[in-house]
Image (cartoon, rainbow, N blue to C red):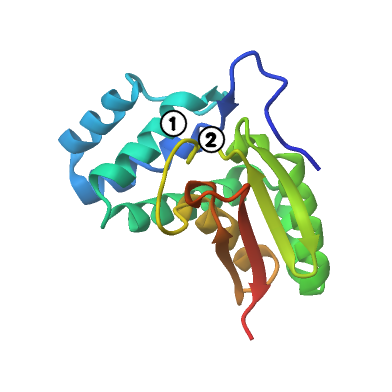
Amino acid sequence: MDGGAHGFAQARIGPNAVLQLVPVLDRTLGRPARVRLLTGAGLFEMPDGTAMIDEGPVARLHQTMRRDFPDLAPGMAAAAGRRTGDYILIHRIPRRAQRLLRILPAALSARLLAQAIAQHAWTFAGSGRFRVASRVPLVFEIADNPLVRGEHAAAPVCHWHVAVFARLFTRLAAPDYTCVETDCCANGARACRFVLARAA
């Protein structure tokens, strides 16, 4: 299952990587700081949400946020990830499908949800290469993750991705699902690795 965006002439990613972050930046840092972050990343106008956008400025935005606000960035990214998950639930997954996933056994719901995520991975993986690396336990990988490409950190930094995955699985598979990033490209790993499991 490869959800990379290699079919695009220019590498692109879903607009919610920006749109759901902006209100969090406004609330936490204030609008002037948010505008400086966006313009510094090369985002001079807000995406309208109807089409994929160039992943380069999006990656610069997330990386600059982590560099300039290291203490606040994890929380802001996680809040934006939860908002992104909520947006997907409201606008992208039909209500009938959601009802079905909620009544199925959690393991089956998780498997079906993982398939759907893999089919639409380009929206959050951009030019990175997404795959379901394991089904038991359920593990996602994003090789060459564009949101951390070229970045160096001592610990995993993909808080936005973690929050997106956790939101979807707790809402649709079982409320006790957790998502943990165990490996990260920013730490020198081959791929960012996300383990999804139910709380013991």
**Label 1 neighbourhood size at 10 Å, few (<14), some (14-19), many (20+)?**
many
Determine the residue positioned at 75% across, 64% down.
110
For label 2, count other residues whose C-alpha is less than 10 Å away and answer few (under 14), some (14-19) or many (20+).
many
Query: In the picture, residue 113 is in which quadrant?
Result: bottom right
Residue 72 percent coordinates (x, y)? 27, 55
Q: Secondary structure at mark 1?
A: helix
Compared to 4, does 99 lie above or below? below
Left/right of residue 2 with respect to residue 33 in the rendered view? right
* Left or right of 196 on screen, residue 42: left
Foreground label between 2 and 1: 2
Q: Answer whether residue 48 is visible to the viewer in this image.
A: no
Is the residue 73 above or below the residue 26 in the image?
A: below
* Quadrant position of residue 103: bottom right
When asked about the image quadrant of residue 145, the answer is top right
Which of the two residues, 199 or 91, is positioned nearer the viewer here?
199
Mark number, residue 58: 1
Look at label 1 and name its amino acid.
Val
Front in this rendered view, residue 158 or 33: 158
- Residue 192 locus on image (x, y percent): 59, 51
**Residue that appears at 62% across and 56% down:** 193
Q: Which percent across, then down, holds residue 61?
A: 36, 34
Q: Which badge, 2 or 1, comes first in the chain's sequence? A: 1
Question: Which residue occupies the extreme front position in the image?
Answer: 188
Determine which residue is flagged by label 2.
146
**Residue at 59% across / 16% down in the picture?**
10
Tell me: residue 46, above or below residue 150.
above
Q: Nearer the viewer, residue 104 or 4?
A: 4
User: Circles 2 and 1: CB distance less than 8 Å?
Assistant: yes
Q: Nearer the viewer, residue 191 or 60?
A: 191
Measured Cα–Cα span from mark 2 to mark 1: 9 Å
